[in-house]
Image (tube, rainbow, N blue to C red):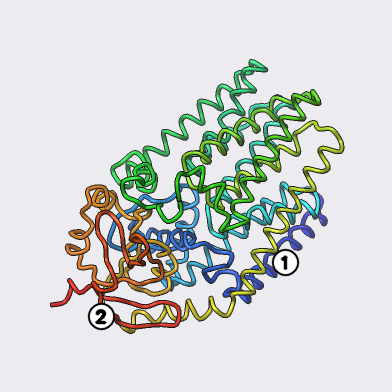
């Protein structure tokens, strides 16, 4: 067997790139990770801490108290395995976070190496992924989308049974259960147009992936769905989204431009929907069955979210990846194709640099903010608990205090039922949760209050100030006074 010099040369180069990249991430750690206004969302810390508790403490929990199923399964499995391995060497939580981020970027490296054909595409796909925040499950969904796209093209050419495609369709519901709507039309349209039984098998596998998702959740928490989906389905009762949804999900996704680029993402998706329709019905451009599978998947997914859910950045990250694939598959008028790709690439570039701009502009504030959070435990008795309605991810991760996630997305079903039954006060009292912060406040009419949820209102007159920092304060409920 001849020595393959070029193979080993490429492998050494890849290894060198990985070492350089990991070193850069380590050196610029605070710049990339500190919340807010950076590359990591508050929800990113939920993933890392739950993975840490699974890998180190063998307990699926955010706060160490409540069993939770509030996450997407596949990504949690991956980073929990990372923590399980790291637990053999260290239980330092920040080291586990670094390990999770390294795994994230390694997956992104292999994804770009396999699916980006040009330097510009590497840049654009990186922008799409990063625009959905580091350490979120969007990366694994995007990886599977591109795997399905490439492997179906290979199957159409070779007509050879693909175990890779079978695995990808099985894993999609485990990556994000709602992306079944995103990919389900692909084998359905191909089955209808080609009568090839292989696509029927893919639909069956997708169904088994969905069933497996339900069964895993049932094993974890005793219910066939995640606690986060349970809370979302009842959010009109638990009022867990009232600070984001103004009048309706549709109105809030399109009208208030408070977060301009977030709203603009929806406008971009709609713009290309109209362009695709013009190309198909006005210019009469014939499209492939695979194009229609991705097209129907993307826009059914988008419009379902548009009317029923507040669309956050990681949703758009997945949708932009699907849009990128549609550009690859579409048969367009030359000028129409070039103009839409230019608009799309320009917008992604602006999003990408916007992340860097925010991280740079607010860097000093972020460093001070996280530094203050790390000091909280110095002012509270041992084993204290803080109730935080929202933006509790970084608070719980960096403070080393048990932080109860108030919106219920990564809490237990028992807590979610307390929200539904307006039993929040009893929950706080029963669990001896005495502390609040004003990192996130709510409204009672025109008045700012510390908490207005599930029938419980906590005003500033109901608490005693424990410590005032530059960026927030800690309070104790007067009802907890002995």
Q: What residue sits 33% from the left and 61% below the top?
A: 444
Q: Earlier in the sequence, mark 2 or mark 1?
A: 1
Q: Image height check: is 92 above or below 166?
A: below
**Number of numbered discs:** 2
Q: Image height check: is 356 above or below 147?
A: below
Q: What residue sits 64% from the left and 55% below the top?
A: 108
Circle 1: element type: helix
Mark 2 to mark 1 CA distance (whole Å): 48 Å
Outermost front residue: 446
Label for residue 391?
none
Tell me whether circle 2 and circle 1 mark residues in contact (CB < 8 Å). no
Q: Image height check: is 344 above or below 61?
A: above
Outermost right residue: 334
Left or right: residue 168 compared with residue 61: right
Please state which of the two labelled residues, at mark 2 or mark 1, is closer to the viewer: 2
Res. 177 visible in picture: yes
In the depicted view, which residue is nearer to us: 452 or 25?
452
Left or right: residue 305 compared with residue 131: left
Outermost top residue: 195
Q: What residue sits 47% from the left and 66% below the top?
A: 86
Q: Position of residue 403 (x, y in %)?
A: 33, 67
Quadrant of the image containing the C terminus: bottom left
Residue, disc 2: 381
Count residues near mark 2 (Cα–Cα under 10 Å), then give few for <14, some for 14-19, many for 20+.
few
Res. 58 visible in picture: no
Left or right: residue 262 compared with residue 337: left
Q: Position of residue 36 (x, y in %)?
A: 52, 68
Determine the image quadrant of residue 151.
top right
Residue, disc 1: 16
Q: Position of residue 62 (x, y in %)?
A: 36, 60
Left or right: residue 169 compared with residue 392: right
Circle 2: element type: loop
């Amino acid at each position: 067997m001849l020595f393959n010099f070029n193979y080993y040369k490429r492998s050494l180069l890849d290894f060198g790139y990985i070492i350089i990249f990991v070193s850069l991430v380590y050196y610029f750690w605070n710049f990339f990770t500190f919340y807010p206004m950076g590359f990591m969302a508050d929800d990113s810390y939920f993933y890392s801490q739950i993975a840490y508790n699974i890998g180190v403490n063998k307990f699926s929990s955010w706060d160490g108290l409540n069993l939770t199923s509030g996450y997407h399964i596949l990504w949690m499995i991956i980073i929990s395995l990372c923590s399980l391995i790291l637990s053999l060497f260290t239980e330092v939580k920040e080291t586990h976070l670094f390990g999770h981020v390294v795994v994230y970027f390694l997956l992104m490296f292999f994804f770009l190496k396999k699916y980006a054909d040009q330097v510009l595409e590497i840049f654009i796909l990186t922008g799409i992924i990063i625009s959905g925040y580091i350490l979120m499950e969007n990366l694994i969904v995007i990886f599977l989308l591109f795997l399905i796209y490439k492997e179906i093209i290979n199957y159409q050419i070779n007509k050879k049974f693909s175990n890779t495609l079978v695995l990808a369709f099985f894993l999609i519901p485990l990556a994000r259960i709602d992306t079944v709507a995103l990919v389900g039309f692909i084998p359905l349209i191909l089955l209808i147009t080609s009568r090839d039984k292989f696509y029927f098998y893919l639909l069956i596998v997708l169904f088994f992936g969905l069933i497996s998702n339900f069964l895993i959740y049932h094993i974890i928490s005793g219910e066939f769905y995640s606690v986060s989906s349970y809370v979302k389905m009842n959010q009109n009762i638990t009022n867990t989204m009232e600070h984001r949804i103004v009048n309706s999900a549709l109105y809030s996704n399109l009208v208030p431009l408070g977060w301009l680029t977030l709203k603009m993402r929806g406008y971009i998706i709609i713009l290309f929907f109209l362009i695709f329709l013009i190309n198909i019905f006005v210019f009469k451009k014939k499209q492939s069955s695979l194009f229609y599978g991705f097209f129907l998947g993307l826009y059914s997914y988008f419009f379902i979210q548009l009317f029923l859910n507040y669309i956050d950045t990681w949703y758009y990250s997945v949708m932009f990846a699907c849009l990128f694939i549609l550009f690859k598959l579409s048969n367009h008028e030359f000028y129409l194709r070039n103009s839409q790709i230019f608009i799309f690439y320009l917008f992604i570039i602006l999003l990408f640099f916007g992340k860097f701009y925010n991280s740079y502009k607010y860097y000093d504030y972020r460093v001070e903010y996280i530094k203050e959070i790390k000091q909280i435990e110095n002012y509270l008795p041992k084993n204290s608990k803080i109730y935080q309605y929202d933006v509790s991810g970084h608070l719980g991760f960096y403070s080393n205090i048990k932080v109860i996630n108030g919106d219920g997305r990564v809490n237990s079903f028992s807590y979610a039922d307390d929200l539904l039954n307006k039993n929040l006060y009893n929950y706080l009292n029963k669990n001896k949760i005495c502390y609040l912060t004003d990192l996130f406040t709510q409204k009672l009419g025109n008045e700012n209050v510390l908490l207005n949820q599930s029938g419980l209102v906590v005003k500033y007159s109901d608490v005693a100030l424990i410590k005032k920092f530059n960026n927030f304060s800690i309070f104790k409920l007067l009802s907890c006074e002995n």
